[in-house]
C-alpha cells in the first residue's frame, strides 16, 4: 500500500543487566519485545500502557534516539524511498531527522532555560542549515502564530511562560522542520485539566492543517481515545492489542485492555466503576512469566496460557490481539 | 444534626516572598462530617494542598496562617480545639498530628526515609502515639508495635507482611509503597485522614486497587477522609461531598451528584466539559476554559475566575462573591446565583 508511512515489524530493545566486578552481563531487560504496527499517512496511532510497558522505549527506537536490538522500522521518506530506520547508517539517517520530530512530556525540562524562544524554536532550523538569523526569526514568528502564541514573545525566555504555553513552544519547535511524523510522548500528562483540552485541540487542528502523522504515546486511556484513529495497547514490552478506536472500546479482544478500561474512574457518580479490578502487579520485563505474560493476572487464564505464548493475530479486519481466546470470548 | 468533625472558616494562608505576597488560600470555608468522604478538587495552584497543610499546621515558612479558624473536635469528647491557634511544634498539635489527623502524601517514594525500613518508620509512629493502643499507664513494647504493624500490612493487602515489614521503601513497587503509606497513616486509628493526591503518581490499574482499598477501609473504620485530587473521575467515584477550589477560594460545594449533574458555578461547568470521557465523540475539539491560570502575584480583582469566565458581567471584577446557598445542600460563590459580596 502506498499510503503507509511507517511499518514496524518485530521491534525489540533489550538492555543488558551487568553484575559484579567485571560487569558481566547476567541477563537482559526485555523492554520492548514484539511490537508490530503500521502507521498510515495523516492518521493518529495511540500507544497506551502502564509505566514500564516499553511504550516510551518503542517510540525512542522509532526516532532512533536509541538503537533497537532487533526488528524492522520501515519508513517511507518524503522522496518516496522506503528505508529501514533500525539499521540505517548515521550519515543516511541525518537528512531524515527533519522528517521525524518529537514532542516531549515535561514542558519544564525540555526547553533550554538559557535560550529565548527564538533560539529554542530556531535551533532545529539552525541545525538543518538555515543560517540567516532574519530568515530564522521570520520562520519562528510563523511557528509561534501557528501554535497560538504571539510572535512578540520570541525574545522572552521559557521561565516567563506557563506549563500550557511551554507545551505550545515545544510543539512549535517540533514543527520547525516541517516534519511528516511527530512522536508525542505524553504531551498533556503534565498539564492541568483546563490546559490539557487546549493542547489536545491544538494538536488536532495542526494535524488537519499540516497533514501530520502522529504517534501519540500516553497512559491516559480517555485522552488517547479522544485523539487517536487507532489504538495500540502494550503490556510488558509486547503489543497485546491493536484496533480502530471505536472498535477497541466497543469490543476489546484482550483481557488486559478490558481491565485497563474498567480501571479508569468514570467522571460520573451515577456510574459506578465496574468490578473486576485487576489484582497483582506488572511482572518485571527482566523475568517475564512463561506463556502469556498476562496469565498471572488474568481471570480467564487456562493451562494453555501458562505454557504457550500467544502470537499477535488478526481476529477481525484491522483488529489484532495477542490472546489465545480472542474472538471466542467476551472480556 | 451531627456536628462537624472539622470546621474550617475563612482560612487565609499567605506566603511573603521577595516579589510580593502570595495569597495561596484566600478565605476558604468547609466542613467535614464524621465518617464522610470529602473530595477537594482543583487545578494546580488552587490552594488545595496548602489548605490541608494548614489543617495539620505543616505550612512551611515563609507561609503563615494569617486569619481564620480550623475547629477540630477531639477524640473521647474532649471538646473542640482551634488548630489555627496551636503552636506547630507544641504538645497538643503533636498529639493530634499523626494520631487523630493523618496524612497520605502524594509521592510515597519521597515520603518514606530510604535509610530506615518501612516497618521501623511505622513502629516509630505507633510507639510515639502508643497510648492509642494500650490501656493507660502501660508502655507498648517494640515487639507489640511490630505485631501491630504486621497486622496493618495484612489489612491493607500487602502479601507476606512478615517479610515486607523489614523492607526498605525502594525495594517496594509503587503500589506496595502506597499501601505501606496507608498502613502508616492508619497506624494510630485516626478519625480524619487527609489523602493528598494519593494515586496521582501510580498507574491506572494500581490506582483502581488503592481506591478500592481506601473505600473498604473507610467503611470498616468509619474514618472521615478528605480526598484531594485534580482527577474528576476519582472524585466522582470516591467522594460523597465535593468542594471545588480555584485560586485559594471555594467556588462551589455540594453533594457529589449535584456537582456532577447540576453544577451551578461556571468554573465547575467548564471543568466538567473540558475532560475527554470514555464515551463522548472522539477527535472533535473539546470545549476549553479560555486563558491560563493567573500568576500568583497577579491575582485578578473581584471574583478570581472572572477573566476566564464566559458568563462574567459588570459586577464580577468589582467585588468578591461570597459562598452562599444556591440550592438544597449546594453552595456557590457566583453573582449569577446570588448578590452577596464578601465584605471589602
Image: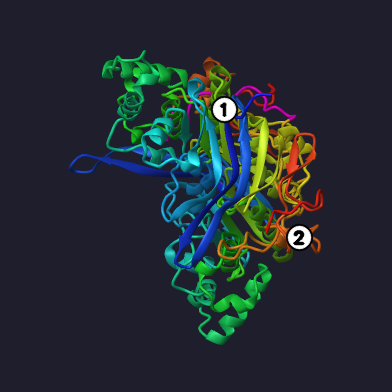
Q: Give the mark nearest the N terminus, 1 or 2.
A: 1
Locate residue B80, reporting x and y percent.
52, 30
Q: Is residue B285 above or below residue B54?
A: below
User: Do callouts 1 and 2 mark residues in contact (Cβ within 8 Å)?
Assistant: no
Locate residue B29, reporting x and y percent.
63, 43
Q: Is residue B13 above or below residue A278?
A: below
Segment colored magenta: A270-288
Give the residue at x 54% y 42%.
Answer: A35
Give the main secondary structure, helix, strand or loop, of the magenta stretch.
loop
User: Is B344 situated left or right of B77 in this image?
Assistant: right
Q: Chain of mark 2?
A: B
Of the pair A128 and B62, the residue shown nearer to us:
B62
Of the pair B153 and B242, the residue shown nearer to us:
B242
Q: Residue under circle 2? A: B316
Q: Residue under circle 1? A: B224
Can I make out residue A89 in this image? yes
Q: Secondary structure at mark 2?
A: loop
Labels 1 and 2 share a subunit: yes
Badge 2 crowding class, 10 Å Cα cut-off, few under 14, some 14 to 19, many 20 or more, is many
Amino acid at each position: 500500500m502506498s499510503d503507509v508511512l511507517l511499518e514496524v515489524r518485530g521491534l525489540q530493545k533489550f538492555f543488558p543487566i551487568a553484575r559484579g566486578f567485571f560487569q558481566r552481563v547476567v541477563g537482559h531487560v526485555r523492554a520492548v519485545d514484539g511490537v508490530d504496527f503500521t502507521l498510515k499517512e495523516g492518521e493518529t496511532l495511540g500507544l497506551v500502557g502502564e509505566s514500564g510497558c516499553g511504550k516510551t522505549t518503542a517510540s525512542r527506537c522509532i526516532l532512533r534516539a536509541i538503537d533497537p536490538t532487533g526488528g524492522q522500522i520501515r519508513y517511507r521518506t518524503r522522496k518516496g524511498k522506503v528505508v529501514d530506520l533500525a539499521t540505517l547508517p548515521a550519515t543516511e539517517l541525518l537528512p531524515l531527522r527533519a522528517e521525524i520530530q518529537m514532542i516531549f512530556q515535561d514542558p519544564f525540562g525540555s526547553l533550554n532555560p538559557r535560550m529565548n524562544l527564538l533560539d529554542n524554536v530556531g535551533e532545529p532550523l539552525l541545525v538543518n542549515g538555515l543560517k540567516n538569523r532574519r530568515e530564522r526569526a521570520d520562520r519562528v514568528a510563523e511557528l509561534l502564530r501557528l501554535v497560538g502564541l504571539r510572535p512578540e514573545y520570541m525574545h522572552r525566555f521559557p521561565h516567563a511562560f506557563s506549563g500550557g504555553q511551554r507545551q505550545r513552544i515545544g510543539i512549535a519547535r517540533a514543527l520547525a522542520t516541517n516534519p511528516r511524523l511527530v512522536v508525542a510522548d505524553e504531551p498533556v500528562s503534565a498539564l492541568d485539566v483546563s490546559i490539557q483540552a487546549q493542547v489536545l485541540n491544538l494538536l488536532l487542528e495542526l494535524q488537519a492543517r499540516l497533514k501530520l502523522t502522529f504517534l501519540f504515546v500516553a497512559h491516559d486511556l480517555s485522552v488517547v481515545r479522544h485523539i487517536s484513529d487507532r489504538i495500540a495497547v502494550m503490556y510488558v514490552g509486547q503489543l497485546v492489542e491493536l484496533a480502530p478506536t471505536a472498535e477497541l472500546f466497543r469490543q476489546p479482544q484482550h483481557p488486559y485492555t478490558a481491565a485497563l478500561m474498567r480501571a479508569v474512574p468514570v467522571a460520573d457518580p451515577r456510574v459506578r466503576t465496574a468490578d473486576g479490578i485487576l489484582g497483582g502487579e506488572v511482572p518485571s520485563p527482566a523475568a517475564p512469566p512463561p506463556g502469556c505474560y498476562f496469565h498471572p493476572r488474568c481471570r480467564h487464564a487456562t493451562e494453555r496460557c501458562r505454557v504457550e505464548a500467544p502470537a499477535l493475530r488478526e481476529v477481525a479486519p484491522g483488529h489484532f490481539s495477542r490472546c489465545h481466546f480472542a474472538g471466542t470470548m467476551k472480556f | 444534626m451531627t456536628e462537624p468533625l472539622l470546621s474550617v472558616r475563612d482560612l487565609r494562608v499567605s506566603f511573603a516572598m521577595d516579589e510580593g505576597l502570595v495569597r495561596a488560600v484566600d478565605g476558604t470555608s468547609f466542613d467535614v462530617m464524621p465518617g464522610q468522604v470529602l473530595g477537594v478538587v482543583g487545578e494546580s495552584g488552587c490552594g488545595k494542598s496548602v489548605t490541608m497543610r494548614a489543617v495539620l499546621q505543616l505550612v512551611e515558612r515563609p507561609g503563615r496562617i494569617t486569619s481564620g479558624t480550623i475547629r477540630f473536635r477531639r477524640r473521647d469528647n474532649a471538646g473542640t480545639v482551634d488548630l489555627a491557634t496551636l503552636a506547630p511544634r507544641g504538645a497538643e498539635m503533636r498529639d493530634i498530628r499523626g494520631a487523630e489527623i493523618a496524612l497520605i502524601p502524594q509521592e510515597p517514594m519521597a515520603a518514606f526515609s530510604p535509610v530506615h525500613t518501612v516497618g521501623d518508620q511505622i513502629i516509630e509512629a505507633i510507639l510515639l502515639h502508643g497510648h492509642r493502643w494500650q490501656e493507660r499507664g502501660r508502655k507498648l513494647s517494640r515487639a507489640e508495635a511490630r505485631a501491630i504493624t504486621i497486622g496493618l500490612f495484612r489489612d491493607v493487602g500487602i502479601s507476606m507482611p512478615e517479610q515486607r515489614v523489614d523492607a526498605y521503601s525502594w525495594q517496594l513497587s509503587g503500589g506496595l509503597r502506597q499501601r505501606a503509606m496507608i498502613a502508616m497513616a492508619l497506624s494510630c486509628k485516626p478519625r480524619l485522614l487527609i489523602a493528598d493526591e494519593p494515586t496521582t503518581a501510580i498507574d491506572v490499574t494500581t490506582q483502581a486497587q488503592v481506591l478500592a482499598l481506601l473505600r473498604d477501609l473507610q467503611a470498616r473504620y468509619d474514618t472521615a477522609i478528605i480526598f484531594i485530587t485534580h482527577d474528576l473521575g476519582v472524585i466522582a467515584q470516591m467522594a460523597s461531598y465535593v468542594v471545588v477550589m480555584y485560586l485559594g477560594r471555594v467556588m462551589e460545594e455540594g453533594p457529589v451528584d449535584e456537582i456532577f449533574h447540576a453544577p451551578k458555578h461556571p468554573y465547575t461547568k467548564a471543568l466538567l466539559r473540558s475532560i475527554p470521557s470514555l464515551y463522548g465523540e472522539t477527535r472533535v475539539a473539546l470545549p476549553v476554559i479560555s486563558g491560563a491560570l493567573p500568576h500568583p502575584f497577579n491575582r485578578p480583582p473581584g471574583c478570581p475566575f472572572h477573566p476566564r469566565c464566559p458568563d462574567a458581567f459588570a459586577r464580577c471584577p468589582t467585588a468578591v462573591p461570597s459562598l452562599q446557598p444556591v440550592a438544597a445542600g449546594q453552595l456557590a460563590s457566583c453573582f449569577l446565583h446570588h448578590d452577596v459580596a464578601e465584605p471589602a
